[in-house]
Image (cartoon, grey):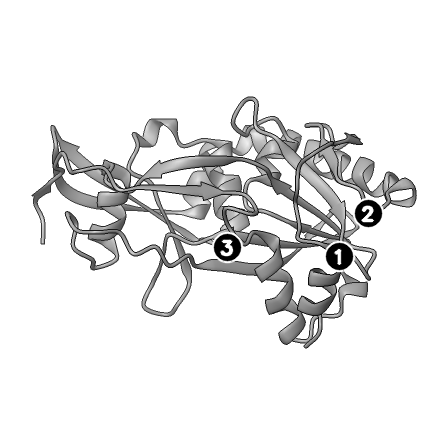
Amino acid sequence: MLPVSYQELEPQYMKTGSFPSQGGMAACLHVLATRGVNFGDIDFLIGGSVLAFLCGQGKKGAKYLAQMCPSTKMVIVSKHKTYTQNFGQRGFQFERLVTGQDMYGLHDLTAHEHLQLLRIGKFRVLATAEVDAVDDQGRPVELKSSNPRFFGIDTLLQMVSSGSQLLLHPHTTGLTVEKIHCIPMEQLASKVAEDVKETDRQIVAAFERLDASKESMTNERYSVLPDGRLRTAEGEALLPQQQVIEDLLKD
């Protein structure tokens, strides 16, 4: 199919982001319940960008909320932002190209997420993150249309969160995609090896602070600071009402 060129398309705007604009963690909780997950074995449930946030590699000014999941001792941490996305942009054209859709057509609005259990320090952490694509064996693949020289620890953490072992990015001349390069996770990890140890230390320390806050947490919502400390948040929702969550947790 190559070479192909990006085009200036009519905007495809969609309001997206956090609950209630998207289902967020509510749908995830229901899937976990139907799969028979024992919530007593899980310390945290986190969204895909939480790891980068907790080590200072996330987007500046991003807001994250934490809340005890009703009927469990599990803390949910997720980004809280509602924004308008334009699926006509080049990054989404590249995504449609790689996944066999019409590069210049309407974007498939179906969202696909990958769930996995991580061991972070002494904690059992369920991570859910959106998946850009899958390979022929159904394994998650990360897609990036930006310049690879900017791929750093934040990109590696994004791949860890989504369970992606491979990153695809285009080689372009002007607006034309000439070829597609594949970067294994190990190669990217080697590039940022000097940062990995300190990043790991920061993330584990942040989860330790979150865990220390568990005893004093109620069903209220909390704003999460980058180091894992909490403060009460007003007027914002991370989850639906408690009764809705309890119904979703029924298998």
Q: Position of residue 209 (x, y in %)?
A: 81, 35
Dot 1 and dot 3 residues touching (CB under 8 Å): no
- Number of marks: 3
Secondary structure of the residue carrying numbered label 3: loop
Q: Is residue 186 left or right of residue 213?
A: left
Alpha-carbon distance for marks 2 and 1?
9 Å
Q: Earlier in the sequence, mark 2 or mark 1?
A: 2
Label 3: how many Cα within 10 Å (few below 14, some 14–19, many 20+)? many
Dot 2 and dot 1 residues touching (CB under 8 Å): yes
**Residue furthest out toward the right:** 215
> Residue at (66%, 37%) from the top-left corner?
236
Q: Position of residue 7 (x, y in %)?
A: 12, 37
From what the image shows, is residue 7 above or below residue 33?
Answer: above
From what the image shows, is residue 194 above or below residue 40?
Answer: above
Q: Quadrant of the N terminus?
A: bottom left
Task: Identify the amino acid type marked 3.
Answer: Gly
Mark 1 or mark 3, whichever is nearer to me: 1
Alpha-carbon distance for marks 2 and 3?
30 Å
Label 1: how many Cα within 10 Å (few below 14, some 14–19, many 20+)? few
Disc assigned to residue 242: 1
Secondary structure of the residue carrying numbered label 1: helix
> Residue at (51%, 33%) from the top-left corner?
153
Label 2: how many Cα within 10 Å (few below 14, some 14–19, many 20+)? few
Q: Is residue 37 left or right of residue 89?
A: right
Disc assigned to residue 219: 2
Disc assigned to residue 163: 3
Q: Earlier in the sequence, mark 1 or mark 3?
A: 3
Mark 2 or mark 3, whichever is nearer to me: 2
Alpha-carbon distance for marks 1 and 3?
30 Å
From what the image shows, is residue 132 above or below residue 145?
Answer: below
